[in-house]
């Protein structure tokens, strides 16, 4: 029974006159009665009764009937369900304790038991025990709290200010005992690897520094332990380090995007857990500055659009030349009057070509400016990992086309010699609707007629390879992307993109189009058409596969940190990608493969807070226990305590039991007041006594 209703009676006085006046009147009447007795007057007793009734009527005695509700005492049973509670034998101790504790508490009379489970499934913030207690106490009246029973391994990661605030609240506002039922073993030892400092970003091709340390609670003197470092599926370093000393490692970032590292030390026999023998780190590789060489064959609005876009990107270092005449053309203009510098052909295309990430030829016709071997250098530059963009004008369909060089071996489109001079709206091809470079250019993927402004010139080409992402006149190829060797090539067969930039008839997404196109050429990971991605979240692995192909099913092979192979079946989504997940996984670095795609995912944080110190200990909660006259009971060494209700003056705990306070709180619900001398009855009694006294004295 959680509450009961009680009825109580009490006597109260509501005088008609001030007490001082009533006291004076009582004194006068008392003297009259005493004088009557002294003179042996007849009817003095009746007069005394008359005076007494008069005084009672003036005092107005009232009976108060009060209804009260007996409030149930509140006991908080707070259970830590964080990750460290999964270490054996803590789950077994919880499984044995909780049913008995709940049964004991449910048998207490006039007691409301509130169960609070807290934890952190994502292992990101660790145990927030004090926050859980404070939250549970928020709606508990201070006079009803009977006890707080915490079931925990003693680990908590609250801020020190929060701990002190809760200790002050419990001691000032509440007078209930705090009990800690401690899980885990008394003698636990553990070895842990801690990342002391690690960067989130780094430059591709350069080294980043990581500082870490390894501690072992069972080793009193500095010993040696073997540290292994893996990057992806390769072991990049193995060395012996001293326990307890901070070590600095230099690691290289091999590619842009996420670079996954796994640090591990061997598991020692008898240690608490092997989870914290491993640390995972993800460093995002970024390019310092992307170097772009833009060569414009003539001054033109399209060239200005390319130049303005590339100059606006802070991550791009642009070198731009507009060629007005070949270097061997005779010109009698004095050098001091010339506004242009000679084109440094040899320096750019022979000596420094490898320093660039992207070369853009904008409306460039064949001239005697670039020797054939320079185009050979460009072909080799692309095959070795560089990128080439060709934005074509009328010259591409003429004998002066740069297709008539060795570039023909890497360009995905051969000119047909036709130039279309008519209005058309660029459209996405079927591949373009799914390719990351173009899929987001229209708000509705699959819209056959996006609201873009028209273009008026297109060069006819015949694709010999690559992927056609955009089409124009009569569905002729407008934008073609291809991969050649380790590098990439893009071919845009129109010089009209500047119309979008000018907003002609509504314009179009020129900035996003050029940004995605150039960043794809420079191998930004998020724009890859063929991608296998995975993200670790808690004990789950979220998997996504992007592909331009049309498979009927996708099954990804997942290799666990222990070397076990799992299969994850993915389902096709409305956007065309394939997604799936694996659950119930342990912390570590996972390798995923599907076809020629490989990806890695780190499950668990780089520095797991919850397992940073997993040893069971009572120190964090001792101030609460001591301030409230509570008790710490280690479940391994003691029987599960029974629960009793005790009064305030009794001791709160014994060897095999703990007590919860009996507060006996009562809340008033209402009152009924009944006068003992109602005015009418008192007046009638007074008149009756006066008549009786008069008749008695008149005989």
Image (cartoon, helix red, strand yellow):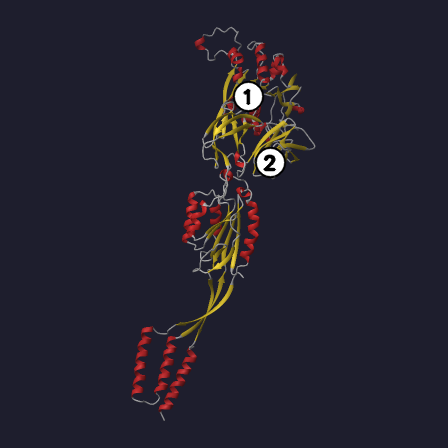
Residue located 37% across and 76% down the image? 58
Which residue is more in the foreground, 218 or 295? 218
Q: Which mark is residue 372?
A: none
* Crowd tier of the residue under label 2, counting other residues whose Cα lies within 10 Å: few below 14, some 14–19, many 20 or above: some
Q: Which residue is mark 1?
A: 302
Residue located 54% across and 53% down the image? 101
Q: Which residue is mark 2?
A: 542
Q: CA distance from mark 1 to mark 2?
A: 43 Å
- 235 lies above or below 216: above
| Residue, far bottom | 699
Percent x, y for residue 528? 60, 27
Q: As drawn, is 427 to the left or to the right of 263?
A: right
* Crowd tier of the residue under label 1, counting other residues whose Cα lies within 10 Å: few below 14, some 14–19, many 20 or above: many
Query: Upstream in the sequence, badge 1 or badge 2?
Result: 1
Percent x, y for residue 539? 58, 39
- 289 lies above or below 323: below
Q: Name the element at disc 2.
A: strand
């Amino acid at each position: 029974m959680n509450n009961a209703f009680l009825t109580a009676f009490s006597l109260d006085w509501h005088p008609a006159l001030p007490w001082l006046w009533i006291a004076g009147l009582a004194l006068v009447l008392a003297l009259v009665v005493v004088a009557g007795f002294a003179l042996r007057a007849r009817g003095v007793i009746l007069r005394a009764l008359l005076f007494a009734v008069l005084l009672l009527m003036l005092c107005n005695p009232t009976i108060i009937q009060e209804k009260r509700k007996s409030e149930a005492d509140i006991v908080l049973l707070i259970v830590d369900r964080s990750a460290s509670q999964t270490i054996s034998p803590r789950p077994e101790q919880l499984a044995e304790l909780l049913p008995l504790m709940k049964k004991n508490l449910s048998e207490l009379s006039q007691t409301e038991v509130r169960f609070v489970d807290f934890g952190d499934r994502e292992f990101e913030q660790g145990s927030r025990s004090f926050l859980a207690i404070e939250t549970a106490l928020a709606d508990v009246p201070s006079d009803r709290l009977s006890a707080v029973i915490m079931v925990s391994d003693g680990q908590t990661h609250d801020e020190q200010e929060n701990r002190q605030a809760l200790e002050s609240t419990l001691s000032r506002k509440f007078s209930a005992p705090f009990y800690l039922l401690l899980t885990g073993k008394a003698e636990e030892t553990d070895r842990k690897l801690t990342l002391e400092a690690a960067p989130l970003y780094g430059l591709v091709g350069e080294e980043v520094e990581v500082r870490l340390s390894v501690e072992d609670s069972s080793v009193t003197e500095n010993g040696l332990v073997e540290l292994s470092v893996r990057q992806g599926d390769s072991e990049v370093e193995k060395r012996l380090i001293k326990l307890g000393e901070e070590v600095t490692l230099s690691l290289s970032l091999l590619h842009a995007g996420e670079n996954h590292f796994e640090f591990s030390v061997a598991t020692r026999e008898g240690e608490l857990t092997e989870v914290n023998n491993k640390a995972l780190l993800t460093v995002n590789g970024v390019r310092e500055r992307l170097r772009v060489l833009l060569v414009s064959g003539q001054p033109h609005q399209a060239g200005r659009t390319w130049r303005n876009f590339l100059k606006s990107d802070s991550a791009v270092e642009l070198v731009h030349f507009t060629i007005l005449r070949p270097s061997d053309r005779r010109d009698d203009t004095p050098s001091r009057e010339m506004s242009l510098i000679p084109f440094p052909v040899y320096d750019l295309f022979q000596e420094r070509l490898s320093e660039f990430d992207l070369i853009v030829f904008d409306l460039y016709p064949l001239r005697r400016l670039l020797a054939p071997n320079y185009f050979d250098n460009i072909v080799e530059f692309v095959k070795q990992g560089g990128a080439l963009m060709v934005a074509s004008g009328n010259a591409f369909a003429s004998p002066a086309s740069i297709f008539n060089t060795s570039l023909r071996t890497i360009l995905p489109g051969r000119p047909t010699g036709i130039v279309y001079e008519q209005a058309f709206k660029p459209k996405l091809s079927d591949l373009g609707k799914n390719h990351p470079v173009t899929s987001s250019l229209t708000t509705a993927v699959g819209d056959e007629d996006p609201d873009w402004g028209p273009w008026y010139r297109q060069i006819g080409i015949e694709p010999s390879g690559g992927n056609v992402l955009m089409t124009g006149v009569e569905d002729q190829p407008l934008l073609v992307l291809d991969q050649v060797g380790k590098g990439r090539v893009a071919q845009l067969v129109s010089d009209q993109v500047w119309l979008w930039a000018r907003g002609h008839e509504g314009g179009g997404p020129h900035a996003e189009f050029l940004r995605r196109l150039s960043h794809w050429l420079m191998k930004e990971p998020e724009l890859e058409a063929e991608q296998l991605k995975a993200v670790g979240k808690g004990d789950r692995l979220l998997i996504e596969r992007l592909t331009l192909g049309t498979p009927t099913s996708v099954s990804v092979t997942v290799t666990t940190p222990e070397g076990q192979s799992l299969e994850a079946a993915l389902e096709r989504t409305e956007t065309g990608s394939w997604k799936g997940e694996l659950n119930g996984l342990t912390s570590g670095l996972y390798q995923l493969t599907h076809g020629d795609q490989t990806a890695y995912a780190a499950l668990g944080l780089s520095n797991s807070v919850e397992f940073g110190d997993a040893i069971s200990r009572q120190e964090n909660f001792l101030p609460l226990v001591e301030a409230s006259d509570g008790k710490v009971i280690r479940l391994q060494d003691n029987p599960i305590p029974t629960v009793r209700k005790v009064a305030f003056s009794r001791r709160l705990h014994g060897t095999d039991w703990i007590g919860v306070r009996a507060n006996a709180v009562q809340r008033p619900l209402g009152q009924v007041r009944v006068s003992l001398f109602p005015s009418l009855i008192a007046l009638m009694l007074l008149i009756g006594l006066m008549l009786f006294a008069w008749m008695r004295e008149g005989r």
